[in-house]
Amino acid sequence: MPIFQDHFLDNRHGWPLRDDWRVSQRIGDGDYTFVIDRLIPEGHSVVWKDLDIPPAEDYKVHAVIQRLGGGNHGFGLIWRGKDKDNCKAFEIAGSGYYKIKQRVNGEWSTIVDWEPCEHIRQKTGTNEILVEQLETSAKFYINSNFVHELPLTTPAENKGFGFIVNGLLKIRVHSTIVMRHVPDLDEDQPLEMSQEDLDEVLAELDEFIGMENIKLEIRTLVNYLKVQKLRREREMKTGNLSLHMVLAGPPGTGKTSVARLIGRIYKALGFLKKGHVVETDRSGLVASYVGQTAPKVDERVQEAMGGILFVDEAYALMPKASDGRDFGQEAIESLLKRMEDHRQEFALVIAGYADEMHRFLDANPGVRSRFNRYLYFEHYNPEELSLIFELFCKKGGYVLTEAAQKKLRVHMARAYALRDNRFGNGRYARNLLEKVVENHANRVVVLEPITDEMLTTIEENDLPPFTDFQLTDPADFDFPEEHLELPEVLAPPAEPVPEEGETAPPQDDSS
């Protein structure tokens, strides 16, 4: 949960502004901009924001800063501070180095001297800097990549945070956010297998209409996880276990329902501690401002810790056409980082149309290799669609006459024959029921007297006909019994190993 956030579209948080011979700070072009005109005596410009963070609370400070030009000097975040003269600083430089230092009673000293970092976008790049303040340490990230952990022994005052600029340098701060840190789950907490819970989940799975291939895949997964658990308990070698998964198929085929069952299976077998499912989509992961996407992804992942993060229509993170201002790619990269760093703490389950999912899986060379289990969902056939409709009727307290059942099967056969990739399957059955119930109400409300049987019986004329469709025995229709062909297999190819590159030492690159 955010403690403080600002997109710097205005100065509504009252940052201290200066404009004198030493330094100019202004609001410009929709961003809060620091422009250093000349060196001040101690070589630093500090902008400080008072912020009362509870002393015992862990937190994270994100900032997105763009280097506009000037000398090759450091700029970055101030955190863990009592005031601007007693704080710590995390800086990066345009040549690809980072540094950690502290200020005590106005005097600076170095904790970690300049270290190379391949994750820094050099020269005039835009970089996300993150400091994760924990009880006994601080962790540092650059563009979502972990770079350093600093042990800390003294408690933090946490009275504010700010920005620091060194030397003849121009930067722009796009945004900042201070968030409460959600602590990781207790790693020492025992994970016990519950056969009773597992049997209950599998019984619910068996009640699903159709989906025979999915049921077989899930039972195979259960058996695999059971064996891996036994091998681990007996200190034997285990496979490279990954809980992440791809669910591919048309809409309305039960992908979300299956994801919820998988979460409960992981919990019952002791691989996840909660087994809950956090459902999201593009809108829950991608922000409208520079630097806010990674924090949004982090929030969703933290909510899903111990369970499943279910991303529906995941291909929307990688639009077919982009004007260069879309942050979906950043969301994908952030997800990849989190799913690798916390591979045993949560499961990422992505879902969407099979054809469209290739776009997501091709977004980054490392995406496919993170997923080793793919479940393919098929369209429901006419008989299954009819059974789903009747199940909805039963749950709603309705029964169909024999003539209504016959018309229903013809209706579903027609719908199945005319289906396309957007066909709603189970959703189509649910929407059809809503229309049938409306027709039933219009028919019954004018009757006198109205009996209980009238209120619960669906008759033939309550089902809407297709346009230009004549009621005929389903046996007269020659509809294909096979489902749509599956797309090419989304198999993960071998991931190329990047070559190591050299990073130049810090140097002055005045521009």
Image (spheres, grey):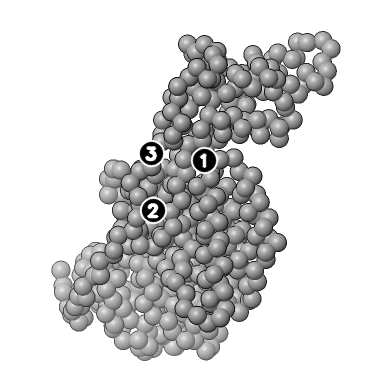
How far apart marks 1 and 2 lie (CA) works out to 35 Å
In the image, 10: left or right of 510?
right
| Occupied quadrant, residue 412 | top right
Say which of 207 and 119 sits in front. Answer: 207
In the image, 208: left or right of 173?
right
How far apart marks 2 and 3 lie (CA) works out to 41 Å
Quickly name the residue at label 2: 289
Residue under the point 55% across and 13% down: 471
Quickly name the residue at label 1: 253
Residue under the point 53% across and 88% down: 154
Q: Does label 2 or label 3 sit earlier along the sequence?
A: 2
Quickly name the residue at label 3: 485
| Occupied quadrant, residue 200 | bottom right
Quadrant of the drawing holding the N terminus: bottom right
Q: What residue type is labelled 1?
A: Thr
Q: What residue type is labelled 2?
A: Tyr
Disc 2 crowd rating (10 Å Cα; few below 14, some 14-19, many 20+) is few
